[in-house]
């Protein structure tokens, strides 16, 4: 009896397809922070200041993220952190 050619074996195609769908689901659920530029970050921080989520400390030139008590000296860092922090909080709520 001849050994089957591994390249012709399609019995595991559904498993590969399922893995690909799961990977797409994970990618869709992730927060993309790479697209935050300075203008967008400033807008996000301004909105957070208006919502009392961030407190600016002008004399120290820092921004304080109140829910986490984390201090930032960059609006971009704060905006990226807040998006990740919000995503983590939402993930915890969905898991419950």
Image (cartoon, rainbow, N blue to C red):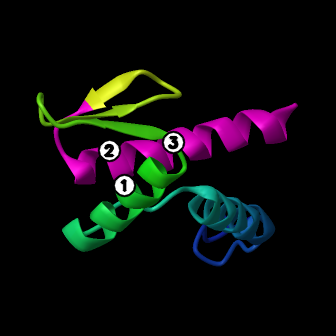
Which x, y percent locates residue 91? Answer: 70, 41
Q: Is residue 95 visible?
A: yes
Q: Please name the predominant secondary structure of the magenta segment in the image.
A: helix
Q: Give the structural element (helix, strand or loop) at label 3.
A: loop
Q: Quadrant of residue 18?
A: bottom right
Could you tell me how many numbered marks the image carries? 3
Q: Are the residues at dot 1 and dot 2 in contact (C-beta closer than 8 Å)?
A: yes
What residue is drawn where x is 80% and y is 69%? Answer: 14
Q: Is residue 65 magenta?
A: no
The residue beneath circle 2 is 78
The answer to which quarter of the image holds residue 11 is bottom right
- Toward which corner of the image does residue 93 lie, by quadrant? top right
Residue span colored magenta: 72-96
Which of disc 3 and disc 2 is earlier in sequence?
A: 3
User: Residue at the location (48% across, 24% down)?
Assistant: 68
Q: Specify the quadrant that holds the C terminus.
A: top right
Nearer to us of marks 3 and 1 is: 3
Q: Report x, y in % for residue 38.
A: 20, 66
- In the rendered image, which residue does mark 1 sit on? 45
Judge the density around disc 3: few (<14), some (14-19), many (≥20) Cα neighbours within 10 Å. Answer: few
Q: Residues within 10 Å of mark 1 (few under 14, many from 20)?
A: many
């Amino acid at each position: 009896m001849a050994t089957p050619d591994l390249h012709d074996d399609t019995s595991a195609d559904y498993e590969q397809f399922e893995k690909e769908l799961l990977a797409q689901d994970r990618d869709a659920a992730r927060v993309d922070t790479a697209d935050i530029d300075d203008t967008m970050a400033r807008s996000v921080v301004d909105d957070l200041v208006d919502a009392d989520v961030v407190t600016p400390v002008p004399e120290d030139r820092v921004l304080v993220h109140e829910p986490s008590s984390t201090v930032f000296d960059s609006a971009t860092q704060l905006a990226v952190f807040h998006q990740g922090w919000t995503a983590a909080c939402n993930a915890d709520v969905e898991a419950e």
